[in-house]
């Protein structure tokens, strides 16, 4: 009976711990990633208080209070109504904002956007047709650092001269 | 020869059957030396405050902010003319011309051609308000059309700054209003307290007016 001989013998080595085989990531994880990219506060949602987070956010609802999204992007959708102080990396206003915006990178007010408050960001885009009342300050971080270091503009922008040793 | 010799077309000339796309017109802008003069003075300050009145042109505001200024945008409600008053009639309450800013805040006030839409009987009030918000040593820049207005109401224009001394005028889609032609002397009177530094009439009948608010002891 040859087929009996082909039966595998039990392995004398100790059993290894179970490992997940390498391959495509499970479906559940992939879905979670997609959800994280589309974080959205819906039109019927109203928030009062401080809103903080570590991911990009789109707001279509109403927020009263304070919004802090350090190093992340905030989009105020067309239906968004915000009465808050905002701090984020990038802020795009398509809806309405009442309050000051401070951004590390850019603030953009779309043609349909309306804003009442002050903007402080290195880059600002105000589309034609946008409604805006307030002030804009585009002071760069470099200049802020200069102010703290006590150096003048001429000192900061002076070209670096290479030292050349002249031999005989 | 029966036929004249045909002139050779250049190789890159379009064929008659091909549709020639119109080239986009690049607006070169209108020179405006008065504005450049005011900006040169104002931008010497470490953090000048500039007030931009009239229809918003985002590019101009960002341009000025990029030059180191703090630019405030005000959507100014233009005053309406006072209704005629009969002798013996009680005084009519009117909304004062007001800019919601503290006294002496701004180094430069840009009113563009807003003055043309202020009725003559409110011009002094308007000038007084400009003087209030301008700081001592500050400047005010305005444009005013000398040409007669059309019988229809006109739309306000916004001005796109291409450079310190280059402007492009663009008509906005805002609600049209009645435009007035103020004599230069009336504008000077309204700007009492300012020292008029220059009035320049452009070819398109636009007057550039630049005025300086001298402080005490200046």
Image (spheres, coloured by chain):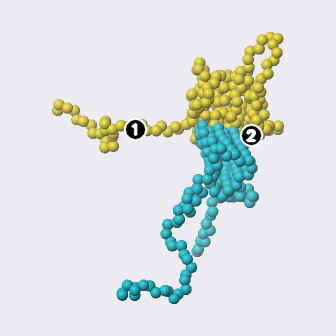
Chain colours: A cyan, B yellow
Above or below B87: residue B180: below
Above or below A22: residue A131: above
Q: Position of residue A69 (x, y in %)?
A: 67, 54
Give the Cα separation between the discs numbered 2 and 1: 47 Å
What residue does disc 2 label?
B106
Q: Are marks 2 and 1 on the same chain?
A: yes
Q: What chain does badge 2 belong to?
A: B
Figure quadrant of the N terminus of chain B: top left
User: Measuring 68% from the left and 44% from the top, which residue is drawn there?
Assistant: A62
Q: Is residue A55 visible?
A: yes
Q: Nearer the viewer, residue B51 or B185?
A: B51
Q: Nearer the viewer, residue A22 or B117?
A: A22
Figure quadrant of the C terminus of chain B: top right
Q: Which mark is residue B21?
A: 1
Please tell me whether mark 1 sits on a helix, a strand or a loop: loop
User: Measuring 81% from the left and 17% from the top, which residue is drawn there?
Assistant: B91
Q: What chain does badge 1 belong to?
A: B
Closer to the chain start, of discs 2 and 1, is: 1
User: Measuring 31% from the left and 41% from the top, which residue is drawn there?
Assistant: B10
Q: Left or right: where does residue B28 sit relative to residue B121?
A: left
Q: Nearer the viewer, residue B88 or B132?
A: B88
Please tell me whether mark 2 sits on a helix, a strand or a loop: strand
User: Measuring 43% from the left and 38% from the top, which residue is drawn there?
Assistant: B23
Q: Residues within 10 Å of mark 2 (few under 14, many from 20)?
A: many
Q: Is residue A76 visible?
A: no
Q: Which mark is residue A8?
A: none
Q: Position of residue B64 (x, y in %)?
A: 65, 43
Above or below B70: residue B129: above
């Amino acid at each position: 009976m040859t087929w009996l001989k082909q039966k595998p013998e039990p392995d004398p080595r100790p059993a290894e711990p179970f490992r997940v085989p390498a391959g495509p990531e499970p479906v559940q994880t992939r879905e979670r990633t997609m959800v994280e990219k589309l974080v959205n506060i819906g039109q019927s949602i109203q928030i009062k208080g401080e809103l903080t987070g570590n991911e990009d956010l789109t707001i279509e609802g109403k927020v009263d209070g304070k919004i802090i999204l350090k190093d992340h992007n905030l989009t105020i959708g067309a239906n968004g109504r915000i009465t808050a102080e905002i701090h984020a990396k990038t802020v795009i206003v398509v809806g309405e904002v009442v309050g000051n915006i401070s951004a590390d990178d850019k603030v953009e007010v779309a043609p349909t956007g309306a804003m009442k408050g002050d903007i402080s960001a290195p880059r600002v885009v105000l589309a034609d047709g946008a409604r805006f009342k307030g002030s804009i300050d585009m002071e760069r971080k470099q200049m802020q650092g200069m102010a703290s270091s006590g150096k003048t503009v001429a000192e900061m922008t002076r070209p670096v001269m290479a030292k050349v040793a002249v031999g005989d | 020869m029966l036929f004249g010799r045909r002139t050779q077309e250049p190789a890159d000339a379009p064929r008659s059957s091909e549709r020639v796309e119109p080239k986009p017109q690049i607006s070169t802008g209108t020179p405006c030396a008065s504005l450049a003069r005011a900006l040169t003075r104002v931008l010497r300050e470490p953090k000048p405050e500039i007030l931009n009145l009239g229809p918003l042109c985002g590019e101009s505001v960002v341009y000025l902010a990029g030059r180191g200024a703090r630019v405030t945008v005000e959507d100014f409600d233009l005053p309406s003319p006072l209704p005629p008053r009969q002798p013996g009639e009680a005084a009519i309450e009117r909304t004062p011309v007001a800019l919601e800013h503290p006294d002496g805040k701004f180094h430069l006030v840009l009113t563009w051609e807003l003055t043309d839409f202020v009725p003559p009987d409110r011009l002094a009030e308007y000038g007084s308000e400009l003087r209030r918000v301008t700081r001592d040593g500050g400047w005010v820049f305005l444009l005013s059309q000398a040409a007669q207005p059309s019988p229809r109401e006109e739309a306000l224009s916004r001005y796109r700054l291409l450079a310190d001394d280059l402007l492009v005028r663009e008509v906005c889609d805002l609600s049209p209003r009645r435009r007035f032609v103020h004599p230069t002397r009336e504008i000077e009177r309204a700007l009492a307290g300012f020292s008029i530094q220059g009035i320049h009439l452009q070819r398109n009948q636009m007057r550039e007016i630049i005025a300086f608010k001298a402080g005490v002891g200046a």
